């Protein structure tokens, strides 16, 4: 069990216990930020207003980028996002190919605006004399 206590100079106190370091990190960083001043017994927020003390873990474990702490959920999410981005790129590329094929026909001598061509097509086709 990891117990994290936050206290501020105006005597506000909040204490919570966590089973995992992850939860304790979120709580601690929420109160004093990701990179507070870390002393021997407590970590102080950058503005000096609040401090965190911890029992059951090291202060250093609660802060920093936690590079050595692997998070399978986050890694899976990142992988999933990459897959989705790849798929979106492919879909866009296909859509662009189709759009190129379906680009509105512009009759010779056409004076329609691009907007009109896209919306209703060319209406000045000289091959239709009426
Ligand atoms: Zn036209």
Image: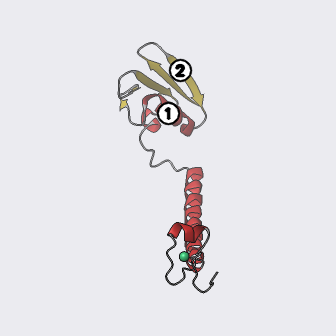
Q: Which mark is residue 14?
A: 2
Q: Would you say residue 92 is visible in this rendering?
A: no
Q: Which of these two is toward me, 86 or 4? A: 86
**Location of residue 107 with respect to 49 vertically, above or below:** below
**Which tag, 2 or 1, sits closer to the chain's start?**
2
Q: Where does the N terminus fall, quadrant-wise?
A: top right
How far from the left and from the top, in percent, is residue 99?
Answer: 58, 74
**Location of residue 58 with respect to 81 vertically, above or below:** above
Q: Residue at x 35, y 25 (%)?
A: 47
Number of numbered callouts drawn: 2
Q: Residue at x 46, y 38 (%)?
A: 61
Q: Would you say residue 20 is visible in this rendering?
A: yes
How far from the left and from the top, in percent, is residue 111?
Answer: 49, 75
**Location of residue 49 with respect to 75 vertically, above or below:** above
For ligand 1, tell me if the residue under mark 2 lies within 8 Å.
Answer: no
Which quarter of the figure has residue 39? Answer: top left
Ligand 1 image-quadrant field: bottom right
Q: Which colour assignment does the render follow?
A: secondary structure
How far from the left and from the top, in percent, is residue 13?
Answer: 51, 17
Q: Which mark is residue 57?
A: 1
Q: Secondary structure at mark 2?
A: strand
Neighbour tally class for label 2: few under 14, some 14-19, many 20 plus, Cα within 10 Å:
few
Q: Which of these two is toward me, 43 or 88? A: 88
Q: Residue at x 53, y 20 (%)?
A: 14
* Relative side of 108 to 38, left or right: right
Q: Secondary structure at mark 1?
A: loop
Q: Nearer the viewer, mark 2 or mark 1?
A: 2
Disc 2 from disc 1: Cα separation: 17 Å
How far from the left and from the top, in percent, is residue 94?
Answer: 59, 74
């Amino acid at each position: 069990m990891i117990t994290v206590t936050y206290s501020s100079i105006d005597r506000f106190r909040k204490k919570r216990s966590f089973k995992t370091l992850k939860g304790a990190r979120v709580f601690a960083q929420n109160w004093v930020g990701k990179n507070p001043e870390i002393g021997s017994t407590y970590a102080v927020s950058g503005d000096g207003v609040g401090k965190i003390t911890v029992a059951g873990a090291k202060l250093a474990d609660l802060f920093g980028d936690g590079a050595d702490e692997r998070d399978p959920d986050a890694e899976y999410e990142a992988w999933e996002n990459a897959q989705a981005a790849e798929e979106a790129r492919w879909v866009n590329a296909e859509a662009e190919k189709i759009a190129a094929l379906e680009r509105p026909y512009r009759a010779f001598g056409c004076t329609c605006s691009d907007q009109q061509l896209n919306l209703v097509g060319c209406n000045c086709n000289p091959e239709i004399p009426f």
